Image (cartoon, grey):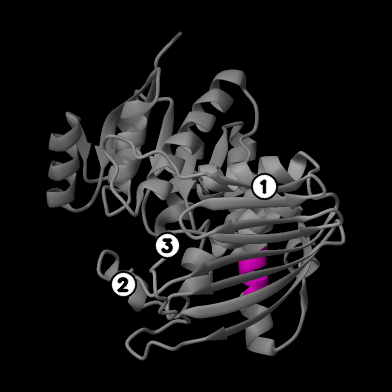
Amino acid sequence: MTELKGALIGCGFFAVNQMHGWNDAAGVRIVAICDRDPARLQIVGDTFGIERRYSSAEALFADGGFDFVDIATTVASHRPLVEMAAASGVATICQKPFAPTMEDAVAMVAACDRAGVAFMIHENFRWQSPIRAAKAAIESGAIGEVFWGRVSFRSAYDVFSGQPYLATGKRFIIEDLGIHALDIARFLFGDATAVTARTRRVNPAIAGEDVATMMLDHEAGITSIVDCSYATRLPVEPFPETLLEVDGSKGTLRLSQSYRLSVHSPDGTEVSDVQPRLLPWASKPWHNIQESVGLIQRHWVECLRERREPDTSGRDNLQTFALVEASYLSAAENRTVPLSEFLG
């Protein structure tokens, strides 16, 4: 099996998880890294033994020598970097959120299509093992035909300590966290046709919204609620768990705190522990997300080798990004927004 070579652009807070994930992936090696911050470049380079280090993406692509690039930078840089990769004929993974605007997102997909290169958004929440277990239970038919669902992420965790820039943007929880929950709703219940959203800022020290509630109308006739909060103080802090409620014609499914999956069907109630693996380099409570990083990276490698489109391709993720944009518009204008306003 020919070794796949990759490059990482962005050596910040989350990129270390991605480097560990690449180290665990079979037949893959990161051969170059890039960051404008010399200190971060040195830390990641020294930690993972990467000799090729760049402060300029232009210089990185000019030297080449890799099959794909993993873009782990902030959103404003995504479009120019993705278009640079496409122009160089390099397959690309891009961190979420996809882009600053829908126009940018569509342009990025088009650039990769024209270049004939694979393009995937690093949307890892649907790859969390508890979410995959819930999906398998739904698809087993145990609870019958689904008609209602809820995807919930409510916490008081200080996310700003590790990522202080999150406190400064006019958009916060839908763009940073809600995007994951909305993608889970699509993964479990299918694409949506419209969204109604309400937002609120509880924390006075931040610029954006820290609470959001969204109701989705899905093509399959399912109604789902997606709710997110970083202002919810609970007796037991659930961060970073996503909780689920799903109602079907024959029963119900609940994914509750501490990764307990309960499936109630005509045959009775089955409760199972779907705790994610604690990888050797991971740490609680982040192990859920850290495991999912490795799983989506493994999926990317399989798709590259088999020449098939990733599940969270740029084209697919336009649907999730449209839900983010529609949610902000709905909250601003106090109306239900059809996804057709963004997807045509």
Indicate the position of residue 11 as horizontal and vertical percent values.
26, 47
> Horizontally, is 28 left or right of 336 in the view?
left
Depth order, front residue of 312/251:
251
Q: Earlier in the sequence, mark 3 or mark 1?
A: 3
Q: Are marks 1 and 2 in contact (CB under 8 Å)?
A: no
Task: State the quadrant of the C terminus.
Answer: bottom right
Query: What amino acid is found at the position of numbered circle 2 in the picture?
Result: Asp
Q: As rendered, which of 236 and 91 lies closer to the eye?
A: 236
Q: Are marks 3 and 1 in contact (CB under 8 Å)?
A: no
Instruction: Determine the CA span between mark 3 and mark 1.
Output: 21 Å
User: Of label 1 and label 2, which has the lower sequence position?
Assistant: 2
Q: Nearer the viewer, residue 21 or 120?
A: 21
Which three-letter amino acid code belongs to the residue tagged 3? Ala
Secondary structure found at label 1: helix
Q: Mark on residue 76?
A: 3
Q: Is residue 200 left or right of residue 163?
A: right
Which structural element holds mark 3? helix
Q: Which residue is mark 1?
A: 316
Bounds of the magenta segment: 323-327
Residue 137 image point, x, y percent: 70, 43
Kindly report the distance in space between the C-alpha atoms of the residues bearing marks 3 and 2.
24 Å
